[in-house]
Image (cartoon, grey):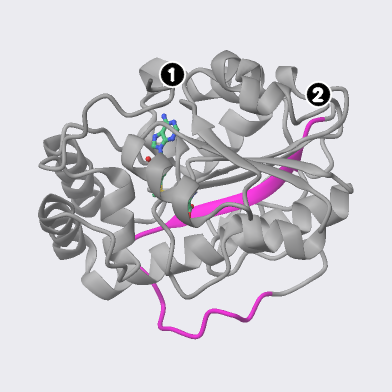
């Protein structure tokens, strides 16, 4: 009998954000619909730049998650929006967390049935469990039995929300979602966030990419650097380091020189690590405007 998480019906004719991202990463885990839609985005933004941003976001997510659990001494992590990432030649979030904190409990969730099936088959036991969860519904995620039986919610949790929030439009109130997540975890919890950013990006590219995702039946919302920071701080998360482009983000006092490609001018994704405590550790963004 199928569980509540079991896919009831899979539509492989529609492009998905997970499949498109896999194509940007030169993965093989895609449908024809994913490739067509992703190629259209790459045509709008410049193919290599889209691919570079995707790879750098992937690497940022692992790097920032590793820093988050290590710096905050957190032993339980929840990766929301796990992606179709098996076989991509970089360490995943769950692998980077285990490297930093071998005894950590690491859970993943996603709202895409194909992603869930792949992650369960190919990314466990690096994830202790993977379950169906929608970032728009934090209550459901934090009440899920796969989570409540494994996490001690009196202790801090690292939440990883990498390249997910831009799929949530303003009418779902991203700040309210991040606030609710903060309320559901113990003080001292961490948040790794990355997000597509329109500051400094040609308006034509922003409009075309937004439209390409809309044509797949999904949605994509670029937000400005100041809006992303505002969403985080309105929700009560204090930035541990300024928001910065994923290809250059580093923990405070460090530099990151892992990106060796050319300047990326037509697409932007920014990220950081934040902590749930009332007093801001760092106010104002140090990122380029
Ligand atoms: C672009 S991929 C990012 C994968 C990974 N987090 C990373 O940054 O490398 C976005 C993932 O988020 C998932 N996703 C999109 N909207 C979601 C939502 N509302 N709730 C949960 N997962 C979501 C997609 O199915 C996909 O697996």
Q: Is mark 1 within 8 Å of ligand 1?
A: no
Mark 1 closeness class: few <14, some 14–19, many ≥20 residues within 10 Å: few
| Magenta-drawn segment | 256-276
Q: Position of residue 284 (x, y in %)?
A: 70, 44
Q: Is residue 136 above or below residue 107?
A: above
Residue 169 colored magenta? Answer: no
Residue under circle 2?
153
Name the residue rendered at 25%, 43% in the picture.
16
Location of residue 43 in the rendering, given as x and y in whole percent from the top left corner: 14, 64
Q: Is residue 47 above or below residue 137?
A: below
Q: Nearer the viewer, residue 38 or 256?
A: 38
Quarter-wise, where is residue 139 in the image? top right
Of residues 97 and 192, the one nearer the viewer is 97
Q: How far across and how far down the image is residue 75, in percent? A: 83, 44
Classify the position of ligand 1 by quadrant: top left, top right, bottom left or bottom right. Answer: top left
Please tell me in which quadrant of the rendered image residue 42 appears.
Answer: bottom left
Specify whether residue 165 is in view: yes
Q: Could you tell me which quadrant the N terminus lies in? A: top left
Give the residue pinned by disc 1: 4
Q: Residue at x 23, y 71 (%)?
A: 47
Mark 1 vs 2: CB contact within 8 A: no
Nearer the camera: disc 1 or disc 2: 1
Q: Secondary structure at mark 2?
A: loop
């Amino acid at each position: 009998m199928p569980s509540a998480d079991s896919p009831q019906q899979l539509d492989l004719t529609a492009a998905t954000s997970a499949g498109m991202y896999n194509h940007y990463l030169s993965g093989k885990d895609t449908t024809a619909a994913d490739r067509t839609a992703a190629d259209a985005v790459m045509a709008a933004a410049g193919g290599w730049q889209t691919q570079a941003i995707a790879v750098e976001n992937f690497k940022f997510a692992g790097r920032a998650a590793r820093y988050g659990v290590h710096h905050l001494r957190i032993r339980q992590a929840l990766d929301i929006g796990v992606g179709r990432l098996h076989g991509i030649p970089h360490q995943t979030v769950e692998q980077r967390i285990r490297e930093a904190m071998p005894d950590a409990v690491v859970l993943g969730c996603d709202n895409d049935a194909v992603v869930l099936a792949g992650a369960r088959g190919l990314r466990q036991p690096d994830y202790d469990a993977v379950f169906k969860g929608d970032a728009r519904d934090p209550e459901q995620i934090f009440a899920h039995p796969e989570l409540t039986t494994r996490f001690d919610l009196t202790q801090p949790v690292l939440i990883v929300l990498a390249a997910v929030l831009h799929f949530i439009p303003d009418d779902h109130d991203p700040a309210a979602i991040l606030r609710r997540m903060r309320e559901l975890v113990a003080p001292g919890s961490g948040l790794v966030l990355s997000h597509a950013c329109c500051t400094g990006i040609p308006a034509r590219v922003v409009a075309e990419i937004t439209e390409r995702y809309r044509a797949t039946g999904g949605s994509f919302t670029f937000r400005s650097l100041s809006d992303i920071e505002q969403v985080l701080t309105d929700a009560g998360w204090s930035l541990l380091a300024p928001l910065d482009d994923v290809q250059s983000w580093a923990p405070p006092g460090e530099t990151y020189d892992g990106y060796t490609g050319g300047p990326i001018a037509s697409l932007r994704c920014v990220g950081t690590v934040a902590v749930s405590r009332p007093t801001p550790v760092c106010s104002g963004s140090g990122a380029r405007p």
